[in-house]
Image (cartoon, helix red, strand yellow):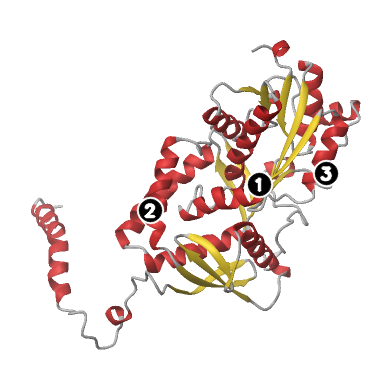
Amino acid sequence: MSKGEIKKVVLAYSGGLDTSVILRWIIEEYGAEVVAYTADVGQGEEVEEARVKALETGAVEAIAEDVREEFVADYVFPAIRASALYEGYYLMGTSLARPLISKGLVRAAEATGADAIAHGATGKGNDQVRFELAAYALKPDIKVVAPWREWDLKGRADLVAYAERHGIPVPVTAEKPYSTDANLLHISYEGGVLEDPWVGPPPGMFKMTTDPEAAPDEPEVVTVGFHAGNPVSVNGVEMDPATLLSTLNDLGGRHGVGRVDIVENRFVGMKSRGVYETPGGTILYHAHRAVESLTLDREVMHLRDELSDRYAEMVYNGFWFSPEREALQAFMDDVQQRVSGEARLKLFKGQAVVEGRRSDTHGLYDEATVTFEADEVYDQSDATGFIRLQSLRLRTFAERRLGEGE
């Protein structure tokens, strides 16, 4: 489909510099109408501001859709059930939101009769892959406009100049020389001064979390309840998914929990520095693993952990709507049927430390067996044969090696 054949485009619109310029650029370069689509995944006041700005910038329609509950229940919680961390640190707040936004773009395109969808992801990043793989998985014949792969604008300076020529307000300033992406799970920071991995985050950059040094001098204890792997309560109060995550964001944020500064490996092949704050998600991750430690069989847990890295890689790389991720999710969710109970954590100066865990229904921990005191459950002499058998191959190997003079 050529430019002339595209008459209407649904644009994933945030209200930031890139998507505001893209909105105007599509109108001028394609001669097409633009419908701005903003998914409310928990970025706050930015949603309404984006809707208004889209209309002022030339959109024929601006759709703002509240998908917060769906985001947490159908994207964040499945990742928590899978114990997913990308490269050992990243809880994937951006990675999990992109497929949901793509789902909304496709839905909006079908509802408005649009010929294509568009996004503001650059040709260097992961988001272009996530948006487009998800869109193609949902609607194989969808057309995608990716301006960063088409236009002759080379960087932020060119975008600022373009915006100024067309009277588009520029949100990026010298005081905040980096880009952000926010949702209920996290806020990410990248680009600008953060491109030098040796330079620390600028003072005052973080929005969700208090600086750990300035956090309260008294710790706070929080108890998180789980049922079949899903978080269901905070301090004994049952909550819907979005409210639960928001509550933990407030608690964790107050104590500076959830800051991560990493250099990660992008799917497209380069290394990138990302800074993230994920207060509620960090609490959930540790609380969930604490309940699992009581309720999951050893070999099941070890197998799951082997697959968690693979799961995280799938999600990070944009394969949320892939058969392999869905198959792996089915395994994760089956394992989670036993994961019910509570974990108690102490929040203090940037840390979320597990202090207790319990499960009244599925706990496998047996104090009578593990005690160092006298018991009638475990015959310690049984360990002699166990060790003898486990050491058999080691002794055989050692005998041969020593016999050969090594």
Residue 262 spot, x, y in % from top left:
59, 49
Looking at the image, is 149 positioned above or below residue 343? above
Amino acid on which the number 1 mark rests in the picture? Val
Tell me, yes or no, if residue 90 can be seen here. Answer: no
Q: Secondary structure at mark 1?
A: loop
Tell me, yes or no, if residue 67 can be seen here. Answer: yes
**Total numbered circles:** 3
Amino acid on which the number 2 mark rests in the picture? Asp
Using the image as rendered, state which of residue 25 and residue 77 is in the foreground: 77
User: Is tag 2's residue or tag 3's residue first in the polypeptide sequence?
Assistant: 3
User: Marks 2/1: CA distance?
Assistant: 26 Å
Residue 28: quadrant of the picture: top right
On residue 238, which mark appears?
A: none
Q: Secondary structure at mark 2?
A: helix
Please identify the quadrant where the N terminus is shown. Answer: top right
The reply to whether discs 2 and 1 touch (Cβ–Cβ < 8 Å) is no
Residue 244 spot, x, y in % from top left:
62, 62
Q: Which residue is mark 3?
A: 49
The answer to whether 3 appears left or right of 357 in the picture is: right
Q: Which residue is mark 2?
A: 334
User: Marks 2/3: CA distance?
Assistant: 42 Å
Looking at the image, is 377 positioned above or below residue 222? below
Q: Which residue is mark 1?
A: 67
Circle 1: is it few (<14), some (14-19), or many (20+) Cα within 10 Å? some
Looking at the image, is 123 positioned above or below residue 222? above
The reply to whether discs 3 and 1 touch (Cβ–Cβ < 8 Å) is no
User: Marks 3/1: CA distance?
Assistant: 17 Å
The answer to whether 8 appears left or right of 351 in the picture is: right
Residue 252 spot, x, y in % from top left:
65, 65
